[in-house]
Each structure stands twice: as C-alpha cells, then as structure tokens.
Image (cartoon, rainbow, N blue to C red):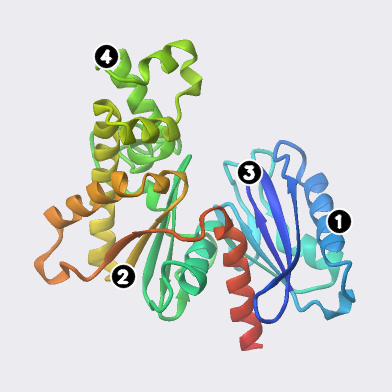
Amino acid sequence: MIAVDIGGTSYRVALVDSSGAIIARNAEPTNGHQSPEIGLKRLVDTIRKTSDCIDFDQLKGVFISAAGPLNPQKGILLTPPSLPAWRNVQLKKVIEESLHLPVWVKNDADLAALGEKRFGAGRGCDRLIYITVSTGIGGGIVLENGILEAAEVSVAEIGHMVVDRNGPVCNCGGKGHLEPLASGTAIARIAAEGIRSGKPSSLQPKYESDPSMLTAALVVEAARSGDSLANEVLSRAGEYLGIAITSLIHIFDPEVVIIGGGVSNASDLILNPIRDAIEERIMPDFKGRSRIVQAELGDNSGIMGAIALGLEKLADS
C-alpha cells in the first residue's frame, strides 16, 4: 500500500508492506500556493516514483492524511488553511482516476489519533483523544468503533471550543475559542504582548531585534531557563487547554488524552498546567480516569496514521 501525509509545507509518500513496515519513502514541498492540478500531478508522480521498486499491480490502495476541514466520505478537501489555493479539491477522485487504485482520505489529526493508538502513546487503549497544539489546534477522537467522524465534514475541531466568552476573536471569526488562547501562534503573540506591556523577559532583545522571530519554541526555551514571563504564558495556555480537555473528558471518558504538535515539546511545562486545570474542574467520578501524556510519534504522526488506517482497512477487506 501507499501512505501519504499532505501538509502545508511538504508532503510525504511511503511504500508500506502488509506488516506496516516502510519499504521506500519520499518527501517533496507541497507548494500549497500553486493550483491543485499542479500539486496533484506532482503527488501522483511521487507515488509512482516511490513504488517503482515493486510491480505496481501489487498495490492494494492509497491512504492519505490531509489537512482539514475535509469531507472524509467523498475525499474532498474543503478549505484547508495551510493550502490556500486548494479549495473543494476532489482528492480521492483524482488520485483514483490517475492510479486506478482505491483511495481513502482522512483528516490529519484524526489519523494522528489512529497512529498514536496503534504505534504510539495510545497503544492498548480503546478510547483516546489526540490534540495537536501547533500553529493552530486540531484534534482527533478514537472510540471503540474507530475514528469519530461525520458524514460530510471532519469533526473534533477542538481548537474552536469556546473556553472564554470574553476571549479574542479567532481566525475563523468566532470569539473566545481555544485556538487564539493556547496555540503556538497564540503563545508567541501573548508573550509579545507581555513584553510590550513592560514585563521583564530574556526574550525582549530577540523581540526588539525582529518581532516576527518570536516563536512558541523560543518561549518554551526561555521557560526552561526560568524566564517568568515565558512560564506565565505557558501556564495560562495550559490552563485553557485543561478547561477544554475537562469538557472532553466529561463527554467521552477517554483512557488517555495525547498532546501532540510543536508545543507538546514543552513537555511538563505545558502538561502540568493542563493536569492542574483538569484536577480543579473535573467531576469527582471522573478523577484519575484519563491520563494526560505527550505524543510519541512527533513529525511522523501523519504518515504513521495513514499506515494505521491502511492496515485497518486491508484487514477488513
């Protein structure tokens, strides 16, 4: 089978055997500003190149992890923010017609959840929630019967849960959503606001030399060195994440909540505030039922999720 992970910066293609082992792989820049026709032709060419070491007729299918929102049943990319030129793209149809193979397309956060269940921090769990905290915030929910998804649009848009009715306006137009309060972008923005307000921080020289260079990764680095502003920002982001996760625990009773994405590299600097916020708000009967852990698959979550989907679908066929 072929596993594909389409991201805003690059896409990855892997040739995978029936045990889930990667035989060959390639990566190319996505160039999401180009037309989807050009992008999909390049993707098809990369799939053929990656599989040229075997007889093409041996392939059983193509399993694609892609940025949402998307229609998981029809395999249509709707309006992915990371691919600004790709709107209502018939991804499944185009790849099937080009390669004459069955194609499955799922939201990248959904497949990251499935990948963590099979290969990572969710091994052995029937119910888990995966939250990616990076430029934005997304999520995937896996229950006993598989990925939680709707008929026409990918769900688990955890970044758009309302956690503060007086919070800032989100990029989607809503108000008080989790994403503008706890994403990597938000962490950098709130740290910058703190510096401008006069709070002392080791980040100040870097911010003053080039404000655009202040990133969540730098905030995490400063927090590890004991910077009070950086620690305050991460603690507040963790609190908002914990508020959202508390509601998810009350609804789904997951065995584990897995935090992925770039901000998860802060480890306990972000996980402990999340746990503290949950402990403060959780109903007594739910206390201690859900572990809060860091993702294990890192940058490989998309491709490993696509592999997990492939193994699942081929086992059922």
Q: Earlier in the sequence, mark 4 or mark 3?
A: 3
Disc 4 residue crowd, few under 14, some 14–19, many 20+, Cα 10 Å? few
Residue at numbered disc 3: 8
Q: Earlier in the sequence, mark 2 or mark 1?
A: 1
Picture residue at 58% right of the left edge, 73% below the top: 308
Q: Earlier in the sequence, mark 1 or mark 4?
A: 1
Please state the horizontal and vertical placement of residue 217, each as a whole percent of the image: 44, 35
Q: Amino acid at mark 4?
A: Ser
Which secondary structure, mark 2?
A: loop
Marks 2,3: beta carbons within 8 A? no
Q: CA distance from mark 1 to mark 4?
A: 52 Å
Q: Image quarter for residue 285?
A: bottom left
Considering every residue shown, the one lying at the far front of the view is: 225
Q: CA distance from mark 2 to mark 4?
A: 40 Å
Q: CA distance from mark 4 to mark 3?
A: 34 Å
Picture residue at 59% right of the left edge, 65% below the top: 304
Residue at numbered disc 2: 254
Residue at numbered disc 4: 197
Residue at numbered disc 1: 45
Q: Label for residue 276?
A: none
Picture residue at 55% right of the left edge, 59% below the top: 301
Q: Earlier in the sequence, mark 1 or mark 3?
A: 3
Along the line of sight, which residue is nearer the eye, 148 or 88? 148
